[in-house]
Image: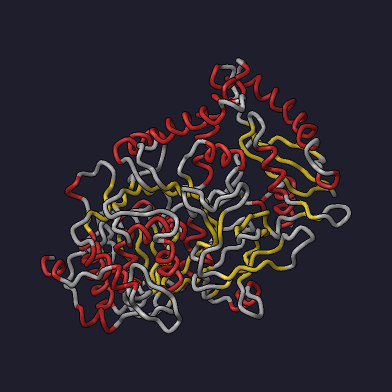
């Protein structure tokens, strides 16, 4: 690897002077293809640590030059197998350096990566492999049983990046012999000859959404790299060597673009936990790694707030009394904020929250506590960022995500009297379309090329975007009024003992399904769990009266029902609304049986 460090350094200044026919201003790369990206990071930060796995030993760290070296070796081997432009290779496994090596190897030769979330069941994985026509699959040993019946042409063990031509009868996938991708000879002429174009597809990402329909979102090199490049210095100033703690799956475009590609463009050190982010491993990791940057879905910070902050603010102690005093409230919030930042390692300067709406009460606390959170809005189809704010909140306004990104043209379709309409986006981050589904692609694009997000939003005079709900979840009131169930759910979720809720139409009215934290109720009321179960039934009866007192006549709740099991969720922790109410789901199953 010695010769790699002698490559001419590609400076950011040099990138900014690139003149493009489309007028886009470059920041960290000289072109929006992954070979350009690899050349930039390996020449600019060759000896810096790119990847580290928590407590795995520094000898296992991977530098930027090593990452690219391994990816080029693997890419050369893929070419020798006959993998070429447009061929699809699936990647199935938890976040790891090997995951990224495989991804870069695939896309750098014009082939297309098909990231599959490791939590997907076997049925979904097999469906995705079939629908995408994957020529090969790189899979962790842990998840191989889910796809063992798929029989892709090429099979790669993701744990150690080994090509497995066949699994002997007396062997398992974990022990099967093969050819290590990282040690293959790099053939630069072949790699140069197979370079992709900016408009070529890099990823096909299959979503599992709240509506139940799974589609393959086709993203180009330009889509992903422009989105990361544009955001690289807008929301926070990042310095080479600063640390990222990565806890989200790389197969999700939010983590991939903003949590991986963007930090690599700036030379950051990305740390993986190496296992599920349970409290027992997360807290020591925060203390030892002391990250500058983290990305999360709202559920994590909402759990922290409900478990550690809310009992203090709503208790009977001195702090709770001071928090209710307008003269001392600010001081109390900032003090709690300092303790919270200490828990995160005391160096956190960017805590990105995306993937689902953040509870308004939690956001109000984070803002008052001066916690360095940042909001973002986007979809897989937009690579993902459409709007956001930085951690200093100069553009922040309560209830708003933040300004629309510079590249994007955002309009609102079919606005109501309040100015709320469907968010539609046009820009270089918008997908090519749904893979092999021109019919679905046509449905989501307007005649003049705007992508219809399916989300309802509002834009203020400063171009800040607020999300009001989903087009498909909006409910028409008895007089044709627009009812946004997410707004009602926010009111319910802010009540004591409520974990989460879902508001759905039923029998001409509105039904609220409410999940109660039984353990918390038992603890606070000093009763047994069995007694708390009975109290929960009484408690939800009072919720209807409480919440309805804050709602207009047409949006009042007709009934409240206790949700005993956790709601089923998408990979980004949104509730799968199409499965509820339970009565409807059972009815659908009965209909299927007939």
Residue 147: image quadrant is bottom left
Left or right for 180, reference 281: left
Foreground pick, 97 / 255: 255
Q: Residue at x 24, y 78 (%)?
A: 80
Outermost residue to the front: 327
- Which residue is rendered at x = 60% and y = 71% of the image? 451
Please state, as top left, top right, bottom left or bottom right, where the C terminus lies in the image: bottom right
Relative to 79, say whether 58 is above or below: above
Residue 495 falls in image quadrant: top right
Where is residue 569 shown, x and y percent of the image? 57, 48
538 relative to 424, above or below: above
Judging depth in this view, the residue of 19 and 473 nearest the camera is: 19
Residue farthest toward the top in the current orientation of the protein: 526
Figure check: 549 above or below 86: above
- Of residue 312 and residue 503, the one placed in the foreground of this image is 312
Visible residue check, residue 302: no
Residue 508 spot, x, y in % from top left? 85, 49
């Amino acid at each position: 690897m010695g010769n790699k460090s002698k490559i001419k350094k590609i400076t950011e200044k040099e990138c900014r002077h690139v003149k493009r026919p489309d007028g886009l201003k470059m920041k960290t790369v000289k072109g929006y293809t992954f070979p350009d990206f690899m050349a930039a990071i390996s020449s600019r930060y060759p000896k810096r640590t790119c990847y580290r796995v928590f407590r795995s030993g520094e000898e296992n760290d991977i530098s930027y030059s090593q990452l690219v070296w391994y990816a080029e070796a693997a890419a050369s081997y893929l070419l020798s197998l006959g993998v070429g432009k447009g061929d699809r290779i699936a990647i199935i496994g938890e976040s790891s350096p090997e995951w990224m090596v495989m991804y870069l190897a695939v896309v750098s030769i014009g082939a297309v990566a098909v990231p599959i979330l490791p939590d997907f069941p076997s049925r979904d994985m097999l469906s995705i492999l079939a629908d995408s026509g994957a020529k090969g699959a790189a899979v962790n040993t842990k998840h191989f049983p889910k796809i063992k019946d798929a029989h892709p042409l090429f099979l790669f063990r993701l744990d150690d990046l080994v090509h497995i031509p066949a699994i002997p009868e007396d062997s398992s996938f974990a022990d099967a012999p093969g050819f290590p991708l990282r040690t293959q000879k790099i053939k630069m002429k072949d790699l140069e000859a197979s370079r992709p174009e900016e408009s070529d597809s890099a990823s096909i990402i299959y979503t599992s959404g709240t509506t139940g329909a799974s589609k393959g979102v086709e993203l180009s090199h330009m889509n992903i790299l422009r989105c990361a490049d544009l955001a690289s210095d807008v929301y926070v100033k990042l310095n080479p060597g600063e640390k990222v703690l990565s806890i989200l799956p790389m197969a999700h475009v939010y983590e991939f673009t903003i949590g991986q590609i963007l930090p690599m463009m700036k030379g950051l050190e990305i740390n993986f936990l190496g296992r599920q982010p349970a409290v027992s491993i997360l807290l020591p990791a925060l203390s030892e790694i002391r990250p500058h940057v983290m990305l999360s879905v709202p559920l994590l910070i909402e759990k922290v707030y409900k478990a550690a902050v809310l009992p203090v603010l709503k208790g009977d102690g001195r702090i709770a009394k001071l928090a209710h005093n307008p003269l001392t409230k600010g001081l109390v919030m900032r003090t709690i904020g300092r303790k919270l930042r200490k828990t995160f390692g005391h160096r956190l300067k960017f805590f990105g929250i995306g993937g689902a709406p953040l509870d308004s009460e939690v956001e109000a606390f984070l803002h008052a506590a001066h916690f360095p959170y940042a909001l973002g809005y986007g979809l897989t189809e937009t690579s993902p960022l459409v709007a956001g704010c930085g951690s200093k909140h100069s553009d922040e306004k309560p209830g708003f995500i933040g300004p629309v990104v510079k590249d994007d043209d955002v309009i609102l379709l079919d606005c109501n009297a309040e100015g709320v309409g469907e968010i539609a986006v046009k820009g270089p981050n918008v997908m090519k379309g749904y893979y092999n589904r021109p019919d679905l692609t046509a449905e989501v694009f307007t005649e003049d090329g705007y992508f219809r997000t399916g989300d309802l939003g509002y834009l203020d005079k400063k171009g800040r975007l607020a999300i009001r709900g989903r087009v498909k979840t909006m409910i028409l009131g008895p007089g044709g009024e627009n009812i946004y169930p997410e707004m009602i759910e926010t009111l319910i979720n802010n009540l004591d003992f409520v974990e989460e809720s879902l508001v759905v139409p039923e029998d001409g009215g509105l039904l609220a399904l409410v999940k109660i934290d039984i353990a918390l109720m038992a603890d606070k009321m000093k009763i047994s769990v069995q007694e708390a179960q009975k109290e929960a039934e009484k408690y939800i009866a009072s919720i209807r009266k409480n919440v309805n007192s804050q709602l207009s006549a047409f949006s009042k709740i007709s009934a409240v029902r206790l949700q005993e099991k956790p709601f089923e969720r998408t990979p980004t922790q949104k509730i799968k609304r199409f499965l509820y109410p339970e009565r409807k789901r059972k009815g659908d199953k009965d209909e299927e049986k007939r």
